[in-house]
Amino acid sequence: TIIDKDFYLGALYGLLGSYFLTLGDLETAQIHFESALNYDSESADACAGLGEVYYQSGIYNTAKEMFEWALKLDGKNQFAEERLQKINRENIMENTNMAADNSVHFQKIERAENLINNEKYSDARLILNEILNEDNKHIDALNDLSVIEILEGNFYRATEMISEIIDI
């Protein structure tokens, strides 16, 4: 019999991603789900798992894309379908609020700052980069990223970011 090594490695990395997701280690879970997709790009479960990492990180646009991809691969992926429906419901509610963008960014900033306080810099960086993808001059996001750089000892990079903030 011929064994499809990539399929099994993809499945193994997907299981590891799920394990770390249940532990709340989003950074490690993300690494394993991405590895799973590198070995098996048609793994709906790995797509859904990566979508959940982004969802729990507050990066809803990317989470939505991953859940949609999971459903394209497996139209019966109930987890991806339920999460996608939840994101769509939340988007409808946000769109009815005139200050939706500001409140969403504020919530993301708060979540990122909590992660920074808990020394989960990579998870915070994911959230802050999502904000900057939507608004590349968001002062709070840039400021929090510079704080992460300082805490990680990257003083040169922190100085560059603070200069960006001053220029705004």
Image (cartoon, grey):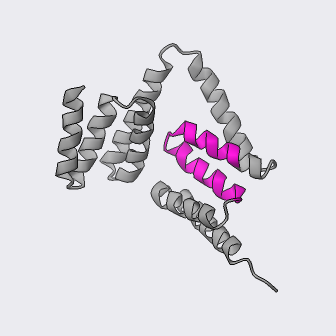
**In this rendering, would 4 be left or right of 126?**
right
Magenta residues span 42-69
| Residue 12 on image: x %, y % | 63, 71
Which residue, as the protein is rendered here, is positioned at the far top? Answer: 98
Q: Does the rendering let one see residue 79?
A: no
| Residue 161 image-quadrant placement | top left
In the rendered image, is residue 28 in sight? yes
In the rendered image, the quadrant that contains the C terminus is top left
Q: Is residue 48 left or right of residue 23?
A: right
- Image vertical order of residue 32 relative to residue 113, above or below: below
Q: Which of the image's four quarters has the N terminus?
A: bottom right
Q: Residue at x 29, y 29 (%)?
A: 139
Measured from the top left, where is residue 35 in percent x and y? 56, 65
Q: Main secondary structure of the magenta part?
A: helix
Where is residue 21 drawn, in percent x and y? 55, 57
Residue found 30% across the figure and 42% down from its top: 145
Question: Does residue 2 appear left or right of residue 80 in this picture?
Answer: right
- Identify the residue at horizontal 73%, vertical 77% (top origin): 4
- In the foreground, 12 or 42: 42
Query: On screen, 75 above or below 92?
Result: below
Which residue is found at the position 70% from the left and 35% from the top?
A: 85
